[in-house]
Image (spheres, rainbow, N blue to C red):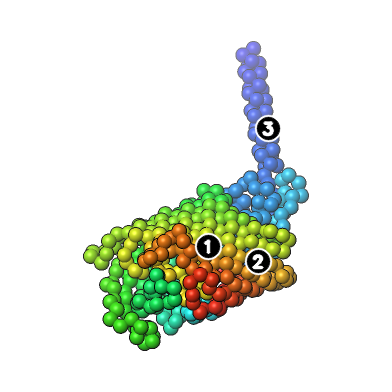
Amino acid sequence: MQNKISLQLKTRWTKALLLFLLCCITSAAQAGGGEKIINVYGLTKTKESVIRTELQLYPDMTEEQIKQQLLQTGLFSDVNVTRTDEKTLNINVQEKWTTIPILKFNSGGGAKQTILGVYDPNIAGQRLELGFQYESLEGAPSQVVWFKDPRLFESRYFIDLQYWDTKRIRLKYEPAANEPLLTKALLLKTQRAYLALGYELSKDLKVRLTAERLDDRFSTELVSQSFLDKVPGQTIPTDVKSTQVGLGVDWGFLKTERAIQIGTLASAQYKYGLIDRDAGTNFSWLRAELLHYQWLAEHLLFAQRLQFGWTDTNTLQYWNYLGGLESIRGFVDNRFATRGYWLSNSELRHMTVEKPYYTVQAVSFVDLLGIDEGSRSIQNITAASAGLGVRLIFPKIYRLTLRLDYSRPVINSDEQFINFGIQQFF
């Protein structure tokens, strides 16, 4: 009798164990059946892990959001995302050429800039950027090397490392004068080490911490005698070493349509500078910028840049320098040196020719600047210019745009009418 009861208990436990194992197998099968199947096509250099990382970091994206997220990497000229069913995702991409030799010649505001180098934002197909650049600005040579990882350890963290050894001729003009009146002509030598570590809170919000170490030295080496003759008896500032720590925020997301960026992007950066020993006092530095790109019609794009800058330092090299090379066309480079300023660049860009391998834009623009220096008040317009330009865009090559602008001053006066170079003005 006892043997019979024992056998029945064993049978029941065996059935329960088998039922438990069956449930586990069924659950595992259902879970496995729920996994998404991702098929990626068109890759030749880029590793598939680059795409899978984006999908892993943002798992709930729609097909359009996946497309824009991958275009945002800058590695692809076209992305097509489809679903065979709820579990199967198909991604077809066309890669850009990313090993870019750098050969630039910019001219604007009377300054000629020649740049040679090479960089690749997709080293070993891992979306790692490494680059080297040599620059000659009005005969003053500079070098920079950099490394960037936008997905540090396949996470939302990103890192940016740079080392600069630069020489730049600094021409300072009298801000209260309506015509260029030179007050200083110096060569600034700078050694700069830069580190930024950031985190992507969401697709449209990034924060970063920065740290810089700078060694600045002024001299009259390489400065043209024609400039030195205009500033007899000028004083040469003392050498300055500083450590600058900062916080930056980027908010917004630029979509890609027809190889053009569309949307709004706002950024702000604050830095606190600690000056070594008795070379000066510690200072604050702030810059905020808004970029906006919007279609007005099928072939007409409106582009706007608004910028505000401020510092409380008396150390000249940490002021804000604005001019024709990169801020307000129609004026000499470094024409306006100031602690505080606002800047507006407005462009109408017409898509005149659109082909698979190139796009031609015709551009009209207005640049405005207000500074708070000398007798100038920041709320007023210190300088303004207007002009026309042309852009030649190559969608299949990583960030390649050729630019030519002709501008004339409207408020204040100068004679630097031609501005050309690589990339959009903003």
Percent position (x, y) of residue 12?
66, 21
Q: Position of residue 424 (x, y in %)?
A: 58, 69
Q: Earlier in the sequence, mark 1 or mark 3?
A: 3
Residue 350 vertical position relative to residue 66 in the rendered view, above or below? below
Mark 1, residue position: 344
Q: Position of residue 88 (x, y in %)?
A: 72, 49
Q: Are marks 1 and 2 in contact (CB under 8 Å)?
A: no
Where residue 92 appears, as percent x and y from the top left, is: 71, 59
The front one of 230 and 201 is 230
Give left or right: position of 80 versus 276: right
Q: Nearer the viewer, mark 1 or mark 2?
A: 1
Indicate the secondary structure of the residue bearing disc 1. strand
**For the residue marked with disc 2, what is the amino acid?**
Arg
Residue 160 appearing in the image: no
Other residues around mark 1 within 10 Å, as few (<14) / some (14–19) / many (≥20)? some
Q: Is residue 403 left or right of residue 287?
A: right
Find numbered disc 2 in the image and state the secondary structure of the residue it sits on: strand
* Occupied quadrant, residue 163: bottom left
